[in-house]
Amino acid sequence: MQSSYNLIKSAVATIGNNQIIATKYINKTLREEKQEQEEVIDVDSIIQSYENIGVGIVKNAKKEAEVIVLKSLEEAAISERVAYDTGYANGTGNGYEDGYKKGYEKSLMDTKDKVKKDIEKAESILALAACDYENYMSEKRSEIINLALEMAKVISSKELKLSEGILHLIDPILEKSKGEENIVIKCNPVHSESIREKLSYWQKAYAIKGEIFILEDTLMEPGNAEVQKKTGKTIVGMDIALQRLEELILK
């Protein structure tokens, strides 16, 4: 099988009927092979902070509305007392029963109107706060999606970057390759040992007629692999899975 990569075969190790082809890139330096420290983002706490801000908007509005209603009721109690005193004074000057009734009812009506307006104002504040909350969370939706993807990437990379983490992705591909003559599995060197240990099993279980070659590719990200056969090639791993996940979420 001809490869489109510019490779130098540095060694070929034969184990039974299986061959491991160790390759290297001409321009690959030791400095480039240095493992970078993985940055872990606490996605859950960031998402929670967004929700806390949204809840805070409603909570503050509710507190403001309660203050308005409480203040209005306190003022109503004072106004009712004033209405009583005003009615009593009017009653004394204009005939007690008639003057008291008119003065008291007028003052009480004014108080009720003010309380009603204050309650309507409080309800308006709460409705606006609910709207603000929905708008805020809507604006943050794309950020939350990106954070969720980042979290999925961190979790999956931890699992798939392990030596044996790629095996359960390769196995179904080989199961569908029964009767194939020759197969090449291209992967990062971190996975080559665990794959090599499964070669004998795969050949017997899936009746692979020819050989299974392992092609180490230091430029391929750990957690990914490419299975090449005469009928075509299949790419499996973290990158393609996350791409499909993103497509599904953003639909």
Image (tube, rainbow, N blue to C red):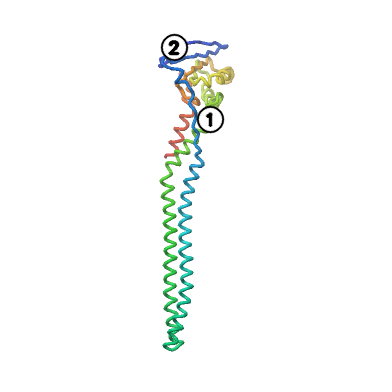
- Tell me the kind of residue under disc 1: Lys
Q: Is residue 192 above or below residue 249?
A: above
Q: Is residue 210 visible?
A: no
Residue 207, how many percent across, how many down?
56, 18
Q: Residue at x 44, y 62 (%)?
A: 122
The answer to whether mark 1 and mark 2 are in CB contact below 8 A is no
Q: What label sits on residue 140 in the rendered view?
A: none
SS at mark 1 in the image: helix
SS at mark 2 in the image: strand
Q: Residue at x 43, y 58 (%)?
A: 127
Dot 2: within a 10 Å radius of its alpha carbon, few (fewer than 14), some, or many (20 or more) residues? few
Q: Is residue 92 visible?
A: yes
Q: Is residue 75 above or below residue 66?
A: below
Q: How many marks?
A: 2
Dot 1: within a 10 Å radius of its alpha carbon, few (fewer than 14), some, or many (20 or more) residues? some
- Tell me the kind of residue under disc 2: Ile
User: Which comes sooner in the sequence, label 1 or label 2?
Assistant: 2
Residue 163, how many percent across, how many down?
55, 23
To which residue does mark 1 refer? 158
Residue 191, how many percent across, how many down?
53, 21
To which residue does mark 2 refer? 8
Looking at this view, name the residue that lies furthest to the bottom: 95
> Would residue 179 be found to the left or right of residue 131 on screen?
right
Q: Is residue 150 above or below residue 52?
A: above
Q: Quarter of the image containing the C terminus?
A: top left
> Would residue 133 be found to the left or right of residue 167 on screen?
left
